[in-house]
Amino acid sequence: MLPKGLRRKKSSACFLLAVVLILGTAGCGGKNGEEEATPSAEPGITAPATEPTEPASQPTQPEEPTKAAEPTEIPKEVRTNFYVSSLDEELPSLSEAWKDYFSVGVALTANELNNEFKTDLIVQQFNSMTCGNEMKPDFLLDRAKTLSEGTETCPVLSFRSCDGMLQFCMDNGIKMRGHTLVWHSQTPDWFFMEGYSNHQDAVFVSREVMLERMENYIRQVMEYVNTTYPGVVYAWDVVNEAIAPGDGEENGMRVDDSLWYQVIGPDFVEKAFEYARKYADPEQKLFYNDFNTYETSKRIAIVNLVNKIREQGNIDGIGMQSHIGMSSPTMDDYETAICKFAETGVEIHITELDIGLDSDSEENLLKEGKRYKRLFFLLKNLMDSGKANITNVTFWGLTDDGSWLNKDGKRYPLLFNQLLETKPAFWGVLLDDGIPLY
Ligand code: 9MR
């Protein structure tokens, strides 16, 4: 049931926030002009332990009996209540609500930390952060300095891109997922070439040289981060997206667009984890991270890879990116993947969660809220039943307008809109009674 009337203690700040955010955003949707009345979910997760197997009659809204009878026809006064300003001091906190289950994270870009309204919201809602891009090899590798000060086996790095984000985490008691050390994408081709050449006729270095470059890269990232910001990074995505069964390789490894595979060979993943373990702080967890992990062939290849690295003692977790749609994957397939991954004995992180929509119609936004709610029910049930050890869930972005998914049109995949108001998705993640499961 939707408690009424959250107080608006910061009305002047609300006005300022709206002015700041609306400027330059004409045509961004009509929610902000809607009702003042607000919902709330009680902080803390009070949902039932099992996910209903058939359309539920809940949530029961005694004062609005038509809601249960026609779950897709949500009365306007309920529907508009989902949009609560992030400035509302009584807004429940996601990380607080889920604190007995997993940390709750958000991927950000460095410039988002220049917006005080956003940083307030981030600190209120999240206890984990991921750099959306700023800690990737193409941001850290400094070619000019590598050419002047590096050696053939040791590149020079610069951490200007992520320093501010790490400092923000340290200042605010937020932990960071280090994303990502070894990835075929966002790693410049010159890193694989003799003399770090970027000429068209450049040739690959030998496997031995590339292994040394890999080790020196991982060592320098870990040493810098762990020395300058001790205790901030708690998990590293050591290798990202190395599996692509479509490439035809016997173990399902990505071949066609992976220079790591082409220069080092199939054991580059094992070597990356070996080096990562060597230089990581003992309490830091090492993850293999990938997308579409619920696809059967990919899931099987990941399990085989992880089992091998686990035998070597060098992996602690699997990251399921989870850029999902409204109907795919099914919750059953998603659950199967988590369970299969959990059977390897490692932790699970949901590392890049978002749900793309075709439009931001009220109906779609509510459906999105329901899907988020079903997903979090599933995660809760898997934890409650001891079937999986899910230790973090991270959303791939703070506000809809900043999502990477918007490159081909707006997709509205996250929990907050452009005005920093909560969406039904936010309340779904809180398992709020105002969001029907079906
Ligand atoms: O969010 C990132 C986006 O800003 C970049 O343009 C993109 C380029 O590779 O990478 C995005 O993040 C990716 C993440 O690092 C790995 N999984 C897929 C994510 C979305 O593409």
Image: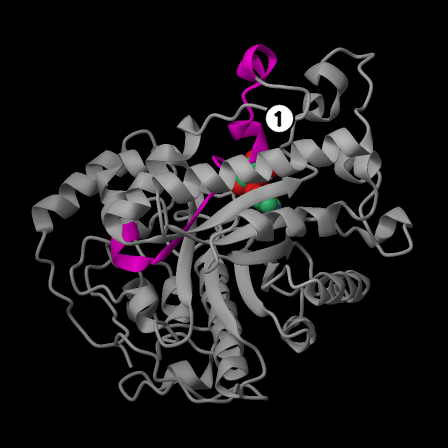
Q: Judging from the image, what secondary structure is the residue with disc 1 in?
A: loop
Q: Is residue 105 above or below residue 199?
A: below
Residue 388 visible: yes
Where does the image place residue 284, in percent across and percent down from the top left? 48, 57
**Residue designated by label 1:** 154
Where does the image place residue 255, in percent across and percent down from the top left? 83, 42
Q: Is residue 216 above or below residue 323?
A: above
| Quarter location, residue 60 | bottom left
Question: Does ligand 1 reach within 8 Å of label 1's beta carbon?
Answer: no
Where does the image place residue 305, in percent across and percent down from the top left? 76, 60
Answer left or right for 70 relative to 231.
right
Q: Amino acid at mark 1?
A: Cys
Give me the residue at 67% from left, 46% from top.
Answer: 272
- Whether the magenta-drawn stretch holds residue 97 is answered as no
Answer left or right for 266 relative to 181.
right
Q: Read off the magenta span.
A: 121-149
| Quarter location, residue 3 | bottom left
Residue 132 visible: no
Give me the residue at 40% from left, 27% from top.
Answer: 160
